[in-house]
Amino acid sequence: MTEVAERIPGLVVVPNGSPYEQNKDDARLALVQKRAIEVKAPLAYVNMTGGADDLVFDGDTIVVDKAGELIARGPQFADELVVVDIDCQVQSSTPDVVISDEPARMNGELQPIVQGRLSDEAEMWTALVTGLRDYIHKNGFTSVVMGLSGGIDSALVAAIAIDALGAKNVYGVALPSKYSSDHSVEDARSLADATGINFRTVAIEPMVVSFMESLALRGIAEENLQARVRGTTLMGISNQEGHIVMATGNKSELAVGYSTLYGDAVGGFAPIKDIYKTDVWALARWRNALAINQGAVPPIPERSITKEPSAELRPDQKDSDSLPDYLLLDQILRLYVDHDHGYEQLIADGFEAVLIKRVISLVDKAEYKRRQYPPGTKVSGRAFGKDRRLPMTSKWAQS
């Protein structure tokens, strides 16, 4: 920036493609203010909007004066023309191109506009909606299909898809097995009734029985077979009707490998793959509260939020049978995955050694599953994939 300052600019314009991540808007403003002070000139930071693959660009154009004072700020996640009157004290710059010698005509004095900030939940929600909408449309699709289990993850993905594409372009499929509870199908149907999405039920038990007669699978193999029959069914519907399949796994599940390859991991896009389970619950409550404030029907059934998570692949199964409580698990995952806290640091953070070793082992051994998972919107500072590049072979790990 020293070289820029030596040229005594009247205005510094910074075109940018800076992707969204949580809490980045606060750091962005501070950085823009710092740079303006360094170059001793007004600075306009102009950021793009929209989604591209797993990235979402959130706009948030910022204009500050040479003292770093905020003059104008554009909206988040939306295109807008920001017009602002800036005091440019040009001393050394000469124009390369003259568009017009005619002075600009203003109808009255311009009033600087500083758009209000979205809440943390609203930011994350809008990023997820934008990421899904642009991925679908920019890749030539118009509609999505997903399994609706009656649980919170698929319900949240459905709500995101509705906001992104409209209810008429969202297709939900209940895929009950002999282990599915009555309330699971009821909650899936309640979501469909409340939102108006397309909905059908396809019982998978006859297909599972057919496989079992030939293979006689038991234990975890039988559990995974059910998930894979569901995945095959959804892909068949996708091929037949032209919808893109949504994978509904969250970041906590991806971190510890709590998913079935070619089962619930099938799909073309995974909207909440960078959202921890505790954030899934928080976003669901926020979206329902927003609907109530707007006088609308909450899209997510309350029971989907409050009931204990379960894959329902065996009798009376609960996620807590295989995993630590999500409140505790997510604390460790945020530190280990997002902030690179190793074993010794996690001990210093106050977690039990046995628990730390178990979680680290699960995360390291699940890398091969994450490599085969569909893309999904990045919202954190450390998403799986390009942000966290580790080998699938985890023999190197020491803890």
Image: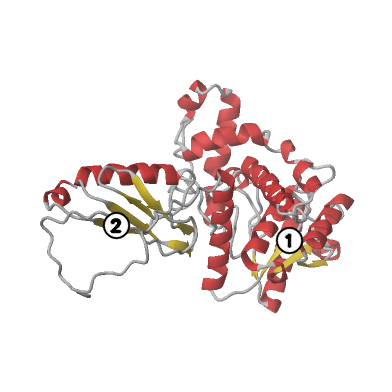
Residue shown at 75% from the left, 53% from the top = 298
The image shows residue 356, relative to residue 258, as above or below, that is above
User: Where is residue 272 shown, x and y percent of the image?
Assistant: 60, 53
Q: Is residue 179 left or right of residue 376?
A: right
Instruction: Count neighbours of disc 1 (C-alpha within 10 A) and say few if under 14, some if 14 to 19, many if 20 or more.
Output: many
In this rendering, does residue 87 appear at all? yes
Closer to the camera, 81 or 395? 81
Disc 1 or 2, which lies upstream in sequence?
2
Q: Is residue 227 above or below residue 315?
A: below
Q: In the image shown, does 273 or 176 lie closer to the viewer?
A: 273
Q: Which of the two discs, 1 and 2, sits closer to the camera?
A: 2
Viewer-proximal residue among 302 and 246: 302
Q: Dot 2 surroundings within 10 Å: few (below 14), some, or many (20 or more)?
A: some
Asked whether residue 273 appears in the rendered view, the answer is no
Q: Amino acid at mark 2?
A: Val
Secondary structure of the residue carrying tag 2 is strand
- Give me the disc on residue 147: 1
